[in-house]
Image: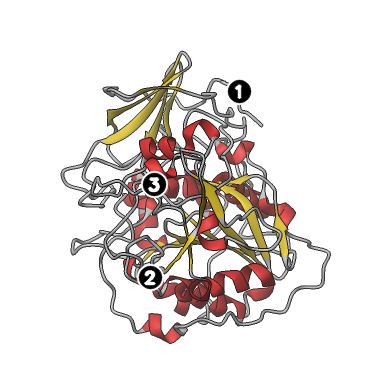
Amino acid sequence: MFAKVQKALLSAFIVFTASACAQSGPIGGLPQPAKNALRTRATAGSSSKIQHVVIVIQENRSFDNIFAGYPGADAPTYGYTGTGKQQTLKQITLQGRVGVDIGHNYHQALTEYDSGKMDGFDQDDFSNGQPAGVFPFAFVKRKQVQPYWDMARQFTLADGMFPSVWGPSFTAHLDLIAGTTIVQNSSIIVSEIDTPYNQNDPNWTCAASPSPPTFILTYENGKTVWGKGGPPPCFTPSQFHTMADTLDAANVSWKYYSPAIGTGAGNLWSAFGAIQSVYNGPDWAKDVISPETSILTDVPNGALPAVSWVVPDALNSDHGGSGSDTGPSWVSAVVNTIGKSKYWKSTAIVVLWDDWGGWYDDAPPPQLDFAGLGFRVGCIIISPYAKPGYVSHTQYEFGSILKFTEDTFGLASLGYTDQRATSISDSFDFTQKPLRFVKIQAKYPTSYFLHQRHSRIAPDNE
């Protein structure tokens, strides 16, 4: 399915300086926002069996890196290099080579993609500029990711989930709250890409001082150009709307559970920190929650909102080179806390990774517009109504999760990628007897995270 170039309702113009790196782009358009976008019906909840949607976000792992060899999934244990050599995926640990990260920005993604041949992974570099060689051809030791496999086997694994945009975490997290990174869409289409300039200070929010400009992609006359000079990360409704707008308009409760970074007041690693109306409005104090471990106490205290996003502390991130193996246990703690609570029978949990982190994946991402789709990531759909032991091969993107949320709570489409995306609803069977939750076994118990000292380090700086 390919999107057509259409007029958009977003009319704000930003001044930018496009530089270097012109690329022949794929199709450039995005769906036109629905006429009734943001006109939601006033409701305090869902009329369906699902009353709560929880989006648990992990960091920087491709589908094959976590699920290589998973029965029934597109998950081979080998890939191919640029010379055509078959390369067996080697076993690694989550701790990895501490501090070593594979490059995974826009240009490195295109190198690995190699026009759909998926054979450029050995041409990538590490974040220090050194050649990565065959290092990206790897999968994580099964014992360490067993909790993820157990979740998948008990519920539904989606092997067709793609981020909506090429590149790393900054844009991925925007897509998970807005379904778009487009900041101008007229005769020249402009999208956020990569990260803001101050990569060494990942405060990519309205609080950043000085406020950094961003990298952008522009699409005009069939060509995509990467460049500098994008707007600062404090986006306005004239640039794009987010789920905060639709949820607030419909009186549907939400929270974004976010780790603190640095020492400044308001320094949270939250995608909503880059949304002006949230950061400078009442939602910031009310709905952006830190520490992120608050979800582990909100659930037993009866305070789980209708919609939640959950981001890990750097200590519990699956990010390459993190030196930590606690990520699967952190996710298990969130899932187990909900699973044993009164919320279990009315909740859908979506566990996914925000980007591929440079790791090998065999599935060529469909190119729906000039900015993506990006490389495939793992996605586990957990609910008493998820199809048990099922592998969904449906093509999803991050907008698929937003579409499911919109449909669940009667919200109008934002009109971005959530409009074109296929909802994750086909991974549910609402006629089945609700599944009984079985605790996910993990190395570190929930109590470990409740007593853990927070790092105040961003889980990703890309």
Where on the picture, by quarter, is residue 64?
bottom right
In the image, 460 versus 108, the foreground residue is 108
Q: Is residue 47 visible?
A: no
Say what secondary structure mark 2 lies in.
helix
Residue placed under numbered mark 3 in the picture: 168
What residue is pinned by disc 2? 316
Q: Secondary structure at mark 1?
A: loop
Coordinates of residue 317 in the picture (x, y in percent) = 38, 65
**Which x, y percent locates residue 137?**
46, 53
Residue nearest the viewer, comparing 190 with 361: 361
Q: Secondary structure at mark 3?
A: loop
Q: Amino acid at mark 1?
A: Lys
Within 10 Å of disc 2 (Cα), the crowding (few <14, some 14-19, many 20+) is many
Q: CA distance from mark 3 to mark 2?
A: 18 Å
Extreme residue in the top direction: 221
Q: Which residue is mark 1?
A: 4
Q: Is residue 385 above or below residue 416?
A: below
Question: Residue at horizontal 53%, vertical 66%?
Answer: 305
- What's under tag 2, amino acid-wise? Asn
The answer to whether residue 344 of the structure is visible from this angle is yes
Residues at marks 3 and 1, CA–CA distance in whole angstroms: 25 Å
